[in-house]
Amino acid sequence: MSAVLPAGPMAGAVEETTIAPAPDWWQSAVIYEVYPRSFADGDGDGVGDLAGLTARLPYIAALGVDGIWMTPFQPSPQVDQGYDVTDYCGVDPLFGTMEQFESLLAQAHALGLRILLDVVPNHCSSEHPLFRAALAASPGSPERGMFHFVQGRDGQTPPNNWQSVFGGRAWSRANPDSATDLDWYLHLFSAGQPDWNWRNPAVGDYFDGVLRFWFDKGVDGLRIDVAHALFKADGLPDSPSEGGVVDGLRSNPQVSDQEDVHEVYRRWRTIAEKYEPHRLLVGEVNLEPARAARYTRADEMQQAFAFAFVKLGWDPEAWAAVGNELEAARLEHGAAPTWALENHDIVRSVTRFGGGELGGVRARAALVALLGLPGAAYIYQGQELGLPEVEVPVEARVDPMWARGGVCRDGARVPLPWTENAALSHGFSLGEPAAEPWLPQPADWGSHAIELQEQDQDSALNLTKAALELRRQLWKNEVFTADDGGSWRVEAGNLLICKRNEHFLVAVAMGTEPVRLPAGTVLLTAAPLEQDGWLQPNNAAWVLR
Ligand code: NOJ
């Protein structure tokens, strides 16, 4: 790794730029995703919690990120590890108490870290009191009107052919033993996650209250789960595509991306802007760039993850094509892309990019590239360590997607290794005696430990910190501005270039031979340059021109 800090070469560049308007904090932000179950376990029960996260906040602050997105810790039977909520305004005792959350929030703010929570508006838990009330009520009742209860076609067959994202059909009988109650309820995910009926205004009112509850507490923003699927096509028509909603909801206009959903985000943006500073809305909008960008129009969410980018392999043409598509969408709708390479649902980038040493080198290059792109970025816990996907033994798997016949997401969720020594699950548990972690750590997990990487100048962790520090400097010196856009191309030898503005470009060598870098000052590389002006395969550079 090499990082040239920006004093000299940037001075000239700064003189030539016009002064950009101060960006809203989220435009330049890098947010660190914490999956609380797997981050740090304060009470030694083998499941990460709020106490563990609070104790480890200084680690996150030292990375140099701007904030944390916490995946759900609200009361839940944990059928889908918290994405099945029974009380949107509470804290599950598994993770701690509301007082602990308030203390976490205060301590994070004192360290300069913003806190985003996950809100899950597409579905709740089948144990949610309103769903329990709906089950107990009769067909056609107002209670059932909060969800999608529909009579089956002939008492035996569900109302339509939709398949669950997790596998199997998207419908379950409300009352399988009843001869008179022939209703089925819709669940795009597991049977434990009934979908809310957003065509019922009472559902929208309910969620307004949820937003206000957390914003009043001082929470800085919300990540919106399955944000594009709240409204289903009127009449719930059959899906023309075989397999129903599978394929990340992308292929099915019956189920998702309905026009009505945008009204929800206009309403939420109005709520978010009643607070100072304005609260951030970031959407999980699993759609192609042109459609996803419509969720970030000026009066909707500020950010939507660039999902077309999240899943890319090591393919420069695909990166450039997606990059240019995202840029076209930005020009049309006005919001910069929100970059991520990993999250708790997808295979770790080290493994996606080839695994082993090669995958590790590429994942470092990809992260360096990501942090130089125009727009906000999200890093998933463990990505800064270069963690690979873990092959979790079949008997230890808990992911409901796996149980329903889909892929298994547990391999990206294994508790973090803090220490080389295996005691206390590699330091994951802070309390003694420590129970086995909820997902087993593999034998070599200690070799990725944070304590080792902190001591190693060339570690993935220190590279991430250097990139984040340099990124901050570039924003401060207005080499990076909120108006930047990405112009992507592939040069001979599979050199991927993203030109951010007149002064700055990101280059990634994605071929098999060294390639000549465009002229300029190299500010940062993912691995040391072997020859001036040349980038070795699988290395990335930030170039100031
Ligand atoms: C997306 C979440 O990230 C994932 O973990 C969850 O299973 C589904 N939405 C359903 O809530």
Image (tube, grey):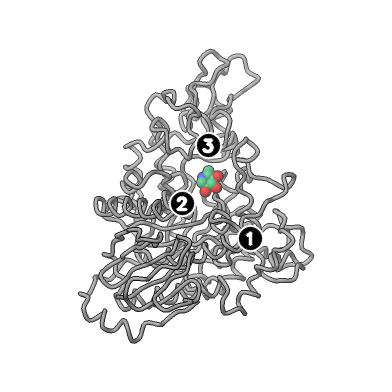
The residue lying toward the viewer, choosing from 484 and 491, is 491
In this rendering, position of residue 141 left or right of residue 501:
right
**Label 1 crowd (10 A; few <14 / some 14-19 / many >=20):** many
| Residue 71 place in picture, x, y as percent | 54, 54
Residue drawn 52% across the image and 76% down it: 62
Pick whichever of labels 3 and 2 is earlier in the sequence.
3
Q: From the viewer's perspective, is residue 202 above or below residue 471?
A: above
Pick whichever of labels 3 and 1 is earlier in the sequence.
1
The residue lying toward the viewer, choosing from 254 and 57, is 254
In this rendering, position of residue 279 left or right of residue 421:
left
Query: The residue tagged with tag 2: helix, strand or loop?
Result: loop
Look at discs 1 and 2 and give the one toward the viewer.
2
In the picture of the structure, the residue carrying the numbered disc 1 is: 49
In the picture of the structure, the residue carrying the numbered disc 3 is: 165
Q: From the viewer's perspective, is residue 424 above or below residue 222?
A: below
Residue at the extreme bottom of the image, as rendered: 8
Amino acid found under the numbered disc labelled 1: Asp
In the picture of the structure, the residue carrying the numbered disc 2 is: 312
The residue lying toward the viewer, choosing from 410 and 44, is 410
Q: From the viewer's perspective, is residue 425 above or below residue 18?
A: above
Residue drawn 41% across the image and 32% down it: 232
Amino acid found under the numbered disc labelled 3: Val
Amino acid found under the numbered disc labelled 2: Leu
| Residue 326 place in picture, x, y as percent | 33, 52
| Residue 80 place in picture, x, y as percent | 60, 44
